[in-house]
Image (cartoon, helix red, strand yellow):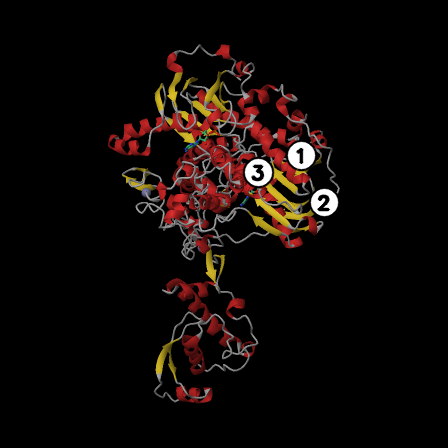
Amino acid sequence: MTSPDTRPARTPLDLVRVRGAREHNLQDVDVDLPRDALVAFTGVSGSGKSSLAFGTLYAEAQRRYFESVAPYARRLIDQVGVADVDSIEGLPPAVALPQQRSGGSARSTVGSATTISSVVRMLFSRVGTYPPGAPMLFAEDFSPNTVQGACPTCHGIGRVFDVPLELMVPDDSLSIRDGALAAWPTAWHGKQLRDSLISLGYDIDVPWRDLPEEQRDWALFTDESPQVPIFTDRSPAEVQKAVAAGRQPRYMSTFLGVRRYVLDTFANSKSARMRERASSFMRSVLCPSCGGRRLKPEALAVTFEGRAITDIAAMPLDEVAELMGVALAPGWEPQGAGPLAPEKRLAAQRLVAELLARLSPITDLGLGYLSLDRTTITLSSGELQRMRLATQVLSQLFGVVFVLDEPSAGLHPADTTALLGILRRLRDSGNTVFFVEHSLDVIREADWIVDIGPGAGATGGRVVYSGELEGLRDVTESVTRRYLFGGHGGDAGTPARASAARDTGTRTTFSDVTRNNIEGLSVSFPLGCLTAVTGVSGSGKSTLVNQAVPELLRTSLASEVDERDGGAGGGGGGETTVEDPPADALLLTPSPVATAGRASGPAERLRRIVQVSQKPIGRTPRSNVATYTGLFDRIRSLFAATPEAKKRRYAASRFSFNLPSGRCPTCKGEGTMEVELLFLPTVHAPCSTCHGARYNSETLEIRFEGATIAEVLGLSVARARELFAGDLEAVRHLDALLDVGLGYVALGQPATELSGGEAQRVKLASELRRVQRGDTLYLLDEPTSGLHPADTDRLLEHLQRLVDGGNTVIMVEHDMRVVAQADWVIDLGPGAGDAGGRVMAEGTPREVARAEQSVTAPFLAAALP
Ligand code: ADP
Ligand code: ADP
Ligand code: ZN
Ligand code: ZN
């Protein structure tokens, strides 16, 4: 790290000077922050780090930007609210890279989000190898999201609906009259179609399988829709005679083959019930024309170094870089084409150089295992943040502040070197980097530390220390200091396990596991123990823990897998909004890729599997921390039980912002209204009737211990614990949230605005509240992300208690202080993607710390008590 004396002394011009910051819990904070430096904001969860970094500094920079680009938007800015601060001087424009709070668009991919795909398309258009005689295509012709490029059969989706034979004819021993063609309509229309077949010479009274093959194929698959004469009240033989004689029929009917009938009904029927019935005979399958590659055949025929553009999109970025690199070698000629014309060679080299420049920060940040076609919704929030960071490095901005939220989330200690490299690159090109961070290794590398606290909420909100690392050593009040410099129980503060080592003998074993980058892996986990799965990012930890383990336990041991991810969660009765999936949702659902392999173990110890992932807990802002955990049901009952509510006969439902009786009629309980701005993103402004309260004024006249229901939703968990101290049930809910370090979160915090780590801890809190039966396996994904080491220790105590109760915990983890406290460690590696997916070491933390080929070992060794 740059030592202080190699940098010139700072003048007031190099400082961002904050005066009187009072956002949220900040207590009139004055602080001077260096510019052109890496500034880490530290402190326990809820101390006020985000309130200062995002709520004050970023918000203020944003407001100034708004004002400069759109003076007319002033009124809106006032409505949206400005940061509560007296003044900030020397603040450059800011770019925020928060952790992803809600899923992106289903069509967004790594390639489109980084804009690398557009360069690849340009490359294929200009210097691709075309089949002889084929015309040159435009860049857009290589995109499945344009009309020009999309496969005409599946319209660029890659999958089409099919009506499989076994669904059309589930029982081929039946005759047509007895309903062999199950997918045909019932009732009158069905009879009419059967009558058409009689006129067409079918025997509808023999088992379906005994009909001639051409007859069967035609009835099922024909795309013709002939007009067929219908004769009623005659035997089949008489009908066929009448048809042959050309007699006048009763009427003419349009015949529809079974497949055609199902597809037409699904696409065109006005009746939702009919469409639903039709969809039950359909399956989505790979598009037969493009094979799922989504592009038109002409585009798929163009290659670069022997690969189609879709092959490149499916490759790990590391390999793309390698493949492209050859084009820069002197004398390079593309595979399968004649010698390159000089101007083409020049174009190829320029485009390839551009591609490599865009790829390098991404691969440097340890994301080289991703592919361009990977959808961004399948990325973790840490991966997404690092991808955006890599894109920013290229934007060549300078004189800007970047505000980051825990950039180390999801990173193995071995990968943090690259992260620091990128942060330093941003700084050295003249930018300032403010980042909220918990990883001690990353904090130690900052130029400047702002420690907020000392506690959370009302006991925090002060600047405990602002300066270079060494100076923090003597600040006894700082909680962070203990972990940075040791002092409280061992170096780096890893607490020693109090109890004796657990028995790791009883196991569940997974054999021949194959999924994503894992191939034929065999691995076993000790039951009644805490196991940490480690490895660099992309090595396969989530593939193993989040996908393979639950799937194999469900299929091999019939365990009940409880994915605590849906909005319905811990039973917010009546509060959860259920959305209908859009009609075309089926089209976009990828086919389920099943894990290959087997699980074995004592089934009675694995009856219930609880998967607590970082997926968001709700798709709608109407779901929040209180409704998700079920706490809000209790709070509404408490409001309904107040004397005034009883007098007015207000039921608990009155206190729901989802139901008409109690909510604000203008915004229907949203609290905000959307405001469209020309050329600017849509702004959500507080509702002009309720000013964000969400309820109507009569409902707000009811108070519990002095607070309205709207005020209760605005309380942090910690404050609510004080307000509801007298109610045991509410306290149980609130304590569970406090135990997982969520004391700072507001009860009404929309589920869509929680970070991945917070969402996971909300789910964990609901789970910790349940009665423990000792037969449960918990699967966790980096449960400590977003937690200060002090909060991490507290969470870990709870996990240890779950295990003491006979349950099993398996977690993906990067924090070596936490891994050191596990009973068992499984280290995957050695690298990412195809270079990973193997077990490099397994055993107790001490054993793994000594393993020679493990990348994790040295970091773990340093963290052992
Ligand atoms: P940190 O980033 O250190 O975890 P925050 O800045 O998010 O802490 O929170 C600091 C305090 O401010 C907490 O007590 C929290 O409850 C409160 N707070 C955070 N966001 C809001 C909000 N939108 N409205 C009211 N209070 C908030
Ligand atoms: P880790 O959890 O160790 O960071 P992952 O299990 O997420 O690693 O990824 C391991 C490999 O599997 C990577 O090459 C990654 O790109 C791939 N992978 C993970 N999830 C998916 C997915 N949903 N679809 C395709 N590939 C995936
Ligand atoms: Zn297609
Ligand atoms: Zn309103």
Q: Is residue 233 above or below residue 533?
A: below
Q: Identify the secondary structure beneath mark 1.
A: loop
Q: Which mark is residue 507?
A: 2
Disc with the residue nearer the chain's start (3 vs 1): 3
Q: Nearer the viewer, residue 77 or 71?
A: 77
In the image, is residue 513 above or below residue 453? below
Horizontally, residue 865 falls left or right of residue 721, namely right
- Asked if the residue under mark 1 is in contact with the one under mark 2, i.e. CB atoms within 8 Å, the reply is no
Report, in whole angstroms, how far the alpha carbon at label 2 lies from the one at label 1.
16 Å
Question: CB of residue at label 3: within 8 Å of ligand 2?
Answer: yes
Q: Residue 782's quadrant in the figure?
A: top right
Q: Amino acid at mark 2?
A: Arg
Q: Nearer the viewer, mark 3 or mark 1?
A: 1
**Mark with earlier residue (2, 3):** 2
The amino acid pointed to by label 3 is Gly
Per the image, the residue denoted by label 3 is: 538
